Amino acid sequence: MKDTNVSELQQFSLLVPDPDETFFEISPNTRCDLSVEFLAENIGHSPSEKKLITDVLTHIPTNPKTIAYRNDIYHELSSEPELCSKLHDIFSWLRDRMPDHYIKKSNDLMVLVTRLTALRSYAFALTKINELISGHDFHSEGLKKLKKYVAGICEGSGFEELGKDIGYALRDIDNVRSVTLGVNLDSNFNVIESGLVSINSFYFTEESVLKNFVKFHRNDKFNDDNETLQFKMTTHRNAYETLELGVTGTTTGGNNMLMTNLNNIITRMLPSTTSKVKKIIDKYADLSGKVLIDLTDEFLFYTRFIELEKRIKNAGLPVCTAETSSGDSEFTNLYNIKLAICHVKGMVKENIVCNDLSFTKERNIHILTGPNRGGKTIITQALGLAFIMYQAGVFTPASAAKLRPCSGIYSHFPVEEEKTVSLGRLGEESARFNEICKTADSNSLILFNESFATTSHTESLYIAEDVIKYLCCLGTRAFFNTHMHELAEHAEDFGKIPEAVCGADSLVMENENGKRSYKMVQKKPDGQSYAREIAQKYGITFEQLSQNLRHGSDAVPAT
């Protein structure tokens, strides 16, 4: 293969246009708070896919060019369903035939054959991909590069010979169907010697083995044993697992030791074949398939989100391709993608409620109040997931969005009590916010969920007010949901301090006649109204309770 193609191959990616790109890694706490793993678990089809999706979603690009690069690929694939489906089939087929990640390099014949078979799969997949996309006129930079890269390999010198060389090397090996073993036992039936009697071009079947066994049994001196059990063929586990365990020696055990010994014997019995296969592997060492494997994973990342988008659309929810902004950030009909997935799966019966939300210089810090179970945490989580999906390069759960990329996404949610033993709840919350402040800047997004509410109301309010003041001076985007209505009562005052570079506002989760609407409105909070509605609902207002006193006056005194 040409060195130039190999060099390009080692750098090509469907997710990262520039190998020097930097990413923001979302912390484990924020992953948990935003349920990123839930998203991966519900769209990935295998453990490896789920891990890949989690990795991509938690290492977000901050460069608008990278976001646009991904989004263009995603949009073009989603708008070409037939092409996307065929490419998906090829990449999925290849994904099932990729042992390179865990098969160690070795001169053992079985390992060499596995690597050569994988090479044959790579070559076949490349040929099929080239046939599929060679005549296609792509618009996205990433798919144009994919087309050029695949054509460069398939049309490069030596690629035509690859198929012939593999066929030549595997000609004899493809005819091997079984082996005959010889095992010597001592008087206690312990194995003392074992060896390979023959390498066969036929399969053993239950019938043929039984006939040979019965024939041997009748001629044996122990022919008075009449309890001859029928022989049953046993299907062994995946060959790659056998190679991983038996050849690389990661575990020990009788069966794996036997496979290791068997492999060594076969390698010695077929020296010319082993040499032939090794020469082919060395000749095409530059086409290891590593980058093609990575491209397979990257392509499947896109297709899994395309599948999710279809399910979300079929449920009647809006989706969009967010525009990139250099200033304000705006959502129209934003909703929680986790809640939407639960709705699609039938886990949530209620209709999904959408909300509009924007971050501007005047309203960059939102303080959200509302009744318990009114949707405050859901919308806080929705905001973080929406920004992650936008920067990951896939669809955004809203009908429209214009967003400025985040330099970092942080969350400040309550943690389990066992994690606060050493510092106490308030100490742990304070220390965690201090860590956020060390790296957050004016382009970050910080999400608060009932923060600093673990001490007295007066102390909580004092700390929260200082935090909001600092956020206004930092100029970051923040969403602060809380039960401290006094904090939101004078939200506009936080942006008036001398060092402030942005303002804050008050949002309220509407609660009409005791019924939750899950809709946000911009207004001052009214804590008493929430309490009054709940009290009336359960009959514990003073007027309602006073009825008990009046009814009690008619009762007969106890004697």
Image (cartoon, grey):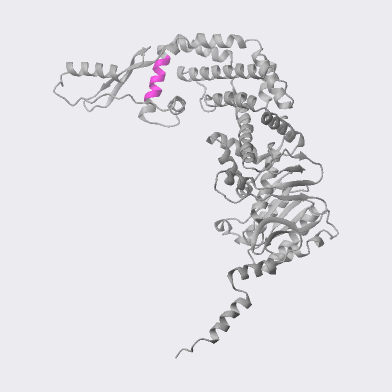
The residue lying toward the viewer, choosing from 47 and 359, is: 359
Q: Seen in the image, is 236 located left or right of residue 41?
A: left
Q: Is residue 541 visible?
A: yes
* Location of the C terminus (image quadrant): bottom left
Residue at left offset 13%, top offset 23%? 224
Q: Look at the image and say whether residue 434 sits in the magenta stretch.
A: no
Residue 534: quarter of image? bottom right
Judged from this view, the residue extending furthest toward the right is 498
Residue 268: quarter of image? top left
Q: How many marks?
A: 0
Q: Is residue 192 above or below residue 534?
A: above
- Estimate the x, y position of residue 379 in percent, counting from the top left: 67, 52
Q: Look at the image and say whether residue 262 sits in the magenta stretch.
A: yes
- Estimate the x, y position of residue 203 in percent, counting from the top left: 36, 16
Q: Seen in the image, is 386 located left or right of residue 241?
A: right
* Location of the N terminus (image quadrant): top right
Judged from this view, the residue extending furthest toward the left is 224
Q: Is residue 351 above or below residue 498?
A: above
Main secondary structure of the magenta stretch: helix
Q: Seen in the image, is 403 located left or right of residue 426?
A: right
Q: Is residue 443 visible?
A: no
The residue lying toward the viewer, choosing from 477 and 342, is: 342
Q: Seen in the image, is 459 located left or right of residue 418?
A: right
Judged from this view, the residue extending furthest toward the bottom is 559
- Estimate the x, y position of residue 372 in percent, counting from the top left: 63, 61
Residue at left offset 55%, top offset 8%? 164
The residue lying toward the viewer, choosing from 138 and 518, is: 518
Q: What range is drawn magenta here?
A: 258-267
- Estimate the x, y position of residue 13 in percent, counting from the top left: 67, 27
